[in-house]
Amino acid sequence: MQALQWDLFCRVIDNFGDVGVCWRLAAQLAGRGQRVRLWVDDASALQWMAPAGCPGVELRAWGAPAPAPHERAPDVLLEAFGCEMDPGLLASSVHRSGATGRKPVWINLEHLSAEPHAERNHRLPSPITSGPAAGWTRWFFYPGFTPATGGLLREPDLLARRSAFDRMGWRKALAASHPQGGSGEGCRWMSLFCYEPPALAELLAQSQSQSRCTRLLVTPGRAALAVQAALAPRAVERAHPQHGQLAVVCLQACPQPAFDELLWACDFNAVRGEDSLVRALWAGQALVWQPYPQDDGAHHAKLWAFLDWLQAPPALRQFHARWSGLDSAPLRWPGDDTLAEWSACVQAARARLLVQDDLATQLLGFVLEKR
């Protein structure tokens, strides 16, 4: 496919998730020879998420002037998660398309969901009837888990890198850099990237009294604050990372490839939102997912739909329900056999995903079709 100019638009609500998804998409498009301008209103997270940048991807601040006449006009306009581009940029695109006689392909990239509406609305047109773009069409494009949706982001070499990953070497290196938490030998390793799960305090309390140690790797931000709040009422001295059989290791912010390795290294991954859920599926380890909480409770249906698609066993469904506060039953910390069952479930789901085209491939095909 010839190199096209893609203009991606991102308004940040969840600083890690929104810009994380958009950056992965931009980098994957650029890796396939496309040119990308990423317009984002808050790019601060990219300083640690993608410190080296990416050839072929150019960052533009939201509200910056439209591309100058000597710059290439967009061939694709992609608004992520229902955000609407700056009206001035749209007017500029309309004006320039009048000179070339070719309209850009205009896509609304929706949120990831396993709910039925994703399949029902995928690739549907939305004609524009007013404003400078009257007569144009904006297309709905839904990422998803089934062949009737747009797929998930996946680099061509992702599974090869996953297979070549030295898990024990990674663990030894982390233990060496955090000696206060012990060597981690014989422990369960769990990563924590969450909002504020209602059952977090219960999980931490159970971890402290297990017969086998747990090494909890906590990501910065809301997850770290949630752990601190959950441990404080138990009169645990924060200066010491070892709480009974629970060793807490607080991590620093890291680039996206390093976050992937964190998920690969752990036996159990607690993830949140969209981007980390997808990366946890590719990791193939047991996981618990916390969708972005919404005031109207819409995330409940999103969680159940995902668990249905995952074909989650009863224990995993119950753990999710308790984790997100949808069930008051006691949390049951998974033993080795349970974790193995959950990992097998995730790996079976990953196998189903691998026979489908990834999101970037499907977007490229869609654009080629509509041009």
Image (cartoon, rainbow, N blue to C red):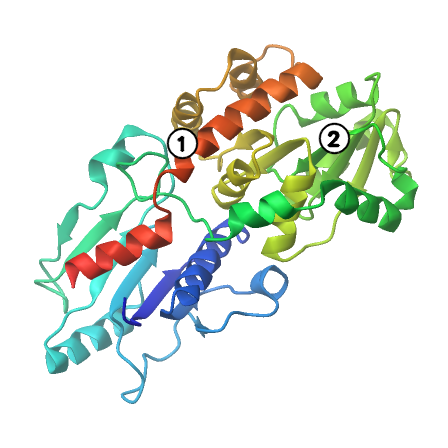
Q: Residue 107: give x, y in percent of width and height.
A: 25, 56
Look at label 1 and name its amino acid: Arg
Up-down relation of residue 47 to residue 361 (above or below): below
Q: CA distance from mark 1 to mark 2?
A: 37 Å
| Residue tagged 2 | 230
Q: Residue 256: give x, y in percent of width and height.
A: 59, 55
Say the numbered circle drawn on residue 272: none
Marks 1 and 2, the one that precedes in the sequence:
2
Kindly identify the residue that appears in the image at 17 percent across and 45 percent down.
Answer: 124
Kindly identify the residue that appears in the image at 58 percent across and 37 percent down.
Answer: 271
Question: Which quarter of the image is occupied by the N terminus?
Answer: bottom left
Q: Picture quarter containing residue 104? A: bottom left
Q: Residue 7: give x, y in percent of width and height.
A: 33, 68
Q: Residue 371: give x, y in percent of width and height.
A: 16, 64
Relative placement, left or right, of 206 versus 355 is: right
* Labels 1, 2: front one: 1
Residue 24 or residue 232, whichever sits in front: 24
Please indicate, yes or no, whether residue 12 appears anywhere in the rendered image. Answer: no
| Residue tagged 1 | 352
Up-down relation of residue 104 to residue 210 (above or below): below
Residue 340 or residue 25, whichever sits in front: 340
Q: Picture quarter containing residue 246? A: top right
Look at label 2 and name its amino acid: Ala
Helix, strand or loop at disc 1? helix
Evaluate if marks 1 and 2 touch, with contact meaning CB atoms under 8 Å apart.
Answer: no
Kindly identify the residue that appears in the image at 85 percent across and 44 percent down.
Answer: 175
Please indicate, yes or no, whether residue 280 appears anywhere in the rendered image. Answer: yes
Helix, strand or loop at disc 2? helix
